[in-house]
């Protein structure tokens, strides 16, 4: 980006923020028409900043900035809709979605379909009773839009349709391969088809989708750890930990 670019009133959401100098911060923002951007919001952490209550995650914004390098300067931001009041598990899940966009999107690579998908999942997390199902649906579509579509219909090599009564192991960069053994990524053809149809009201299908997509995303992350997923797993372990009674082992 050699020439200066000025953008006005672009729909966007803040994905991440970090302090910069005394009262400023650097924002990673996903925008509809310019993809993921990084800008400095000068003075925005100051007590008198008019942007203090505006620059928040999950709040639909219209942002303006100027840039002549990869790091631009925010020139304005205003609220463009109702805040997404995500709390509890929904909040951690929304931060997980933000982390996925941070890791997978490239700066200034417009992907309006991913922006629309992001808006959709954030709104869904507000109202759904099945957060895990909403996340699995998002992950499948997100991977597809990135060019990493998950093959859930054909056997690797032969391209034959998956047989309902046969078992297949999902192998990265290949897909389902017929096997006669069990394993963490071995599922029947019927299960693969149920995942493809997103029948996540079935707890068994949802668990299988969770296991499959967790490994696929980890593979594409190339060893990078998602902080939000780690927090969610630790919270989940805390909830299901057995309650110690008097006289029990410590």
Image (cartoon, grey):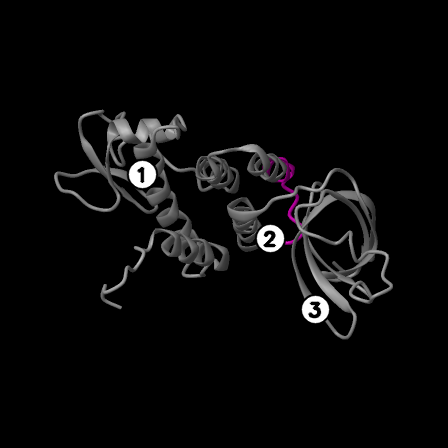
Q: CA distance from mark 2 to mark 1?
A: 30 Å
Secondary structure at badge 2 equals loop
Q: Position of residue 183 (x, y in %)?
A: 20, 46
* Camera-nearest label, 2 or 1: 1
Who comes first in sequence, dot 2 or dot 3? 3
Q: Residue at x 26, y 32 (%)?
A: 155
Q: Is residue 212 above or below residue 191?
A: below
Nearest the viewer among 198 and 141 is 198
What mark, if any, has residue 181 been given in the picture? Answer: none
The residue tagged with tag 1: helix, strand or loop? helix
Residue at the (34%, 29%) spot, across then down: 202
Q: What residue lies at 39% left-to-right and 25% top-to-bottom?
A: 197
Magenta region includes residue 75: no
Identify the residue at the far bottom of this view: 22
| Mark closest to the chain's N terminus, 3 or 1 | 3
Q: Which residue is mark 1?
A: 208
- Badge 2 or badge 1: first in the primary sequence: 2
Q: CA distance from mark 2 to mark 3?
A: 22 Å
Residue 47 point in image, percent of width and height:
83, 66
Quadrant for the N terminus in the image: bottom right
Q: Is residue 112 magenta?
A: yes
The crowding category of the residue bearing disc 3, from other C-alpha atoms within 10 Å (few below 14, some 14 to 19, many at least 20), is some
In the image, the segment drawn in magenta is 106-117
Q: Quadrant of the C terminus?
A: bottom left
Q: Residue at x 26, y 26 (%)?
A: 190
Mark identifier at residue 106: 2
The residue at which mark 3 appears reads as 19
Please tell me whether mark 2 or mark 3 is closer to you in this view: 3
* Position in image of residue 236 (x %, y %): 40, 52
Crowd rating for badge 2 (residues with CA inside 10 Å; few <14, some 14–19, many 20+): few
Left or right side of 83 for 136 = left
């Amino acid at each position: 980006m050699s020439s200066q670019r000025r953008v006005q009133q672009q729909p966007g959401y803040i994905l991440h923020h970090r302090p910069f100098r005394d009262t400023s911060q650097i924002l990673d923002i996903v925008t509809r028409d310019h993809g993921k951007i990084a800008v400095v919001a000068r003075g925005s952490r100051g007590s008198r900043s008019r942007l203090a209550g505006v620059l928040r995650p999950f709040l639909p914004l219209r942002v303006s900035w100027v840039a002549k390098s990869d790091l631009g300067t925010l020139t304005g931001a205003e609220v463009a809709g109702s805040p997404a009041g995500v709390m509890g598990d929904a909040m951690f899940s929304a931060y997980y979605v933000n982390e996925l966009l941070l890791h997978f999107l490239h700066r200034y690579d417009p992907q309006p379909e991913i922006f629309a998908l992001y808006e959709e999942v954030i709104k869904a997390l507000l109202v759904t009773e099945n957060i895990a199902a909403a996340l699995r649906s998002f992950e499948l579509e997100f991977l597809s839009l990135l060019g990493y579509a998950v093959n859930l219909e054909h056997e690797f090599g032969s391209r034959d349709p998956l047989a309902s009564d046969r078992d297949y192991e999902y192998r990265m960069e290949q897909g389902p391969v017929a096997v006669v053994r069990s394993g963490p990524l071995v599922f029947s053809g019927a299960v693969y088809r149920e995942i493809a149809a997103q029948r996540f009201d079935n707890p068994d299908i949802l668990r299988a989708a969770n296991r499959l997509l967790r490994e696929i995303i980890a593979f594409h992350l190339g060893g990078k750890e998602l902080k939000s997923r780690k927090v969610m797993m630790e919270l989940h372990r805390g909830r299901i930990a057995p309650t110690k009674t008097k006289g029990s082992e410590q």
